[in-house]
Amino acid sequence: MEALFAIEEALVGLEPEDRTPAAAPVLIDLVFESLAIDEDELNAVSRRGLLLAAAEGNPKESSAAGSRAALETASGLMEDGYGDALQGALAELAGVVPDTCPCTAAVVEDLRGDAVLAVEALAVVVLHRALE
């Protein structure tokens, strides 16, 4: 719950149009474990994404939202059926965001309303976790 307050604090200082892109990967990371992504599938999809990111130069910089690596990884995650699981996890997250965190709640709703954006943020999380 403390993480949600910290996210809210950071979002308040941003322009409304910048909030979802900034917070999406952080919020997806909060629900990542609940997705129970199969380790073999995770390794396969992250390996392909990391190869694309490495081909671009710096894998950390080349695995951001909108990058070829993130888009290809998102496609793999969708093919593996994780879009629905992610939407379920976001619905659960929406239920625990405090009323005192309206910016965070709005970003969660944006992600719930745009499955492609949500899965792309999941791809960014997958790639960055693989780089750790």
Image (cartoon, helix red, strand yellow):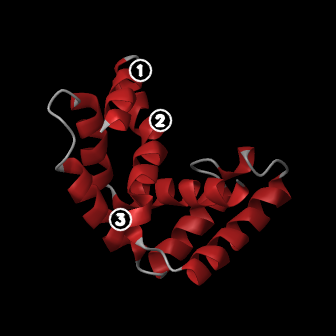
Residue that badge 1 annotates = 14
In whole angstroms, how far apart are the C-alphas of marks 3 and 1? 25 Å
Is residue 113 toward the left or the right of residue 72 in the image?
A: left
> Callout 1 environment at 10 Å: few (<14), some (14 to 19), or many (20+)?
few
Is 94 rendered above or below residue 33? above
Which one is earlier in the sequence, the residue at label 1 or at label 2? 1
Q: Amino acid at mark 2?
A: Ala
Q: 98 left or right of 43?
A: left
User: Pointers 3 and 2 in contact (CB under 8 A)?
Assistant: no
Residues at discs 3 and 1 in contact (Cβ within 8 Å)? no
**Residue 121 % position (x, y):** 48, 53
Residue 6 at what x, y percent from top left?
A: 38, 28
Q: Residue at x 21, y 30 (%)?
A: 102
Secondary structure category for the residue under label 1: loop
Q: For the residue carrying disc 2, how many other residues have a C-alpha within 10 Å: few (<14), some (14-19), or many (20+)?
A: some
3 or 1: tag closer to the N-terminus: 1
**Distance from the alpha carbon under mark 1 to that under mark 2:** 9 Å
Which residue is labeled 3 in the image?
Answer: 86
Q: Quadrant of residue 18?
A: top left
Secondary structure category for the residue under label 2: helix
Label 2, on which residue?
A: 22
